[in-house]
Image (cartoon, rainbow, N blue to C red):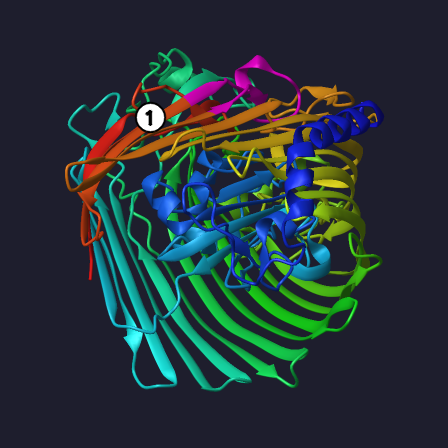
Amino acid sequence: MIKHLVPRLLSTAIALASPAIAHAQEADASPSAGAPADADGSQEIVVTAQKREERLSDVPLSVTAVSGDQLARQGVSNPAELAKVVPGFTYQNSAYGVPVFTIRGIGLFDNSIGISPTVSVYVDQVPLPYLAMTAGAGLDVARVEVLKGPQGTLFGQNATGGAINYVAAKPTKDLTAGLDLTIGRFKTGNAQGYLSGPISETLGFRLAVKHENRGDWQQSETRRSDGLGKRRFTAGRVLLDWQPSDRFKLSLNANGWLDKSDTLASQFIGFKLTLPPPRGYPEVTAAIGNRPFAPNDSRIADWDPGIDFQRDDWLYQFAAQADWGISDSVTLTSITAITEFSTFAPTDSDGTEYNNFRRAIDGRIKSFSQELRLMADLDAVNLTTGINYQDDKTQERNPTAYRGSNSGVGPFRYFRFDNVTDQQAKTYAVFASADIELTETLKAQLGARYTKQNRDYQGCLRDSGDGALAAAIGFIPVIAGGAYNPVGAGQCVTLTSNFQPAGLITDELDQDNVSWRAGLDWKPGEDLLIYGNVTRGFKAGSFTPLPAVYASQLTPVTQERVTAYEVGVKATMLDRLMSLTASVFYYDYKDKQILGSGNVPIFGTLPQLQNVPQSDVRGAELDITLRPLNGLRLRAGGTYIKSQVTRSYLTPDPLGRVVDVKGEAFPNTPKLQVALDGEYSFRVGEMATYLGANLAYRSASNAAFGENPTFRLKPYSLVDLRAGFGPESEAWQVEVWGRNVFNSFYWTNVNYAVDAISRAPGMPANYGATLRLRY
């Protein structure tokens, strides 16, 4: 497939771009550092995808960059909503609320806050190393850059899928301020503002805060007066930029957020006993065995009555970046960050009013990172080299209450248990990257990073303190022909392979790797770039908290490896009325990490980390922006992906049926994603007015391996509309907007929690108005 697509793509792109080549040859071949104006007078986005400022059209990588203003107009306020503007990006809500990001099929679904993702997120190149930390990343941003494919050489470990870099709006030379006030459906009332300016000739500041407030949008299926879905989210950031000379700059960043929102309620769509009689307990069937499935209405769900599902999450971060211009061509940069995150998030994942399975994530993460890099702009070489250190400590407990069919052993019943996990990961890296000018139009890119990670683990399945689980697990040796041997209340109950108490399980996982990138790009003129890259990236192995009756269930996954081949083109043509980016890619994927399933004696199917030995991803991407009329901008972006497991691999599906997943597509990896956006700006009297619309489409996929239709994620399209007006001075602006205006019913995940199958619904239609004030 790839060998046919590459020449076709290149020949088509060159043909389309031939007017651009002619135009570029007549123009100055060395444009100024300032970004050139587009046809509508807007500025081309300047990005830092390679950790230095470059025009987006000059970067030989697949990058989607969107300005902060456009994000605001399209209602993208957090990373989970990036699918509206970034083809190839998907968001999934895990069973217990931990977000899952995937780019071009490379993602890791897990319910733990402490497992490293395949898509790394940064704010001003400062890492947010775990996705649960990213809720406030979209505060007061100048732009967001989404880099696709392995980014291990410059953006570090784990970025096998890609990297998302938010660039915060910076302090201004003059005193400025802004305030955005929003009202909307479900009693929405949001406020966001900033104040920015100089403190002295060398010191500037920027203060940004926001608060999001919303009422219930979900309704209990059995108790219509009971609601869920409140939003209570507050974020803030203070930036200080000190520049005492042309050669030195110090930037300080203190930010944080507090989330007191409700967790998402699920919808019951299926029933299957984990342990049918006579081994299981019949009251589950009596309670929900004949319960009707949830209607196809995103607002209707169900949860246990009398339980508070408000989360208590917070994060704070302190970061400092120092840039020292040693000479006109050499810069030394230091980035230091301390981040601490805490969560308590109770979730009812079975979608019923019966306590079949209810769990909370109670955890804390402390992360310290330090990067020191040297950048040199030599005559024909741009060189970047540096070292990186990161120290992460994660503590997680999953207090669980349930009355499932497997909630006991023999005569002993239990209704509570804890999964506990503590991990510490120390990561050391050294890296170097060079852009080499071979000729006036041809450049080569070479980069490599050596990474070593030492990960220490301790954890177990633990009695909740009432002694019931300890008594039940202690009866397993009796079933095996031994003696009754329970541990004490509140102790670890995990067993060895000989059915003896194992106590607190300790383990370590020490691995290293070399990520690298090699590329060529040809730029015959200002308006055309053709590039090719071969990149290798790794994601570190890890442990995760699990209901581990046996110590063998806690075996970690080892690191995965992605080798990516990509050819692309970026072109501007028709006198800058049209811009085009296109690429084809092939990923060779080894040891893909998944949270799969295992059949555990006595207890049935339970979750388990696994490595899928061999798989691949093939795809193509196209992004076109047109400005056919003054004030009219049309954008169409799409990604086609064919992912598959290429080697035989036997594993239980979520319902316990052993399947060979060879030939199957990856979970949560739609073949086709499309993002369309259009906006028309015009004048009505003295008012600057605009009308806009956005469509995001994704085709069907599966929530888990096994191709069981119950776990199918249906295709859907979401349509947003917007209209705004205000004076040319932009002193104020009013926007009315609608999200999911056709009220499409969709869901982002299907989960099997013991006996109940449930789905995570997406938001219904929402609408409102925003007033923006600028001073």
Side of 572 relative to 557 (left or right): left
Amino acid type at image mark 1: Asn
Q: Residue at x 78, y 67 (%)?
A: 381
Element type at marker 1?
loop
At x 74%, y 46%, the residue is 524
Residue lying at 20% horizontally and 24% vertically, measured from the top left: 223
In the foreground, 23 or 672: 23
The magenta segment: 697-717
Using residue 581 as the reference point, say whether residue 83 is left or right of it.
left
Displayed quadrant of residue 503: bottom right
- Measured as percent of width and height from the top left, residue 329 is found at 68, 78
Can you say whether 322 is above or below 162 in the image?
below
Question: Seen in the image, is 700 located left or right of residue 758?
Answer: right
Q: Residue furthest front?
A: 26
Identify the image quadrant of residue 655: top right
Residue 199 lies within the magenta run: no
Question: Position of 512 compared to 332: left or right?
Answer: right
Which residue is pictured at 36% across the width and 19% down the height?
Answer: 744
| Residue 607 image position (x, y, % from top left) | 61, 36
Q: Which residue is mark 1?
A: 740
Identify whether 119 is placed above or below 761.
below
**Quarter occupied by the C terminus:** bottom left
Figure quadrant of the N terminus: top right
Comparing 155 with 598, the one in front is: 155
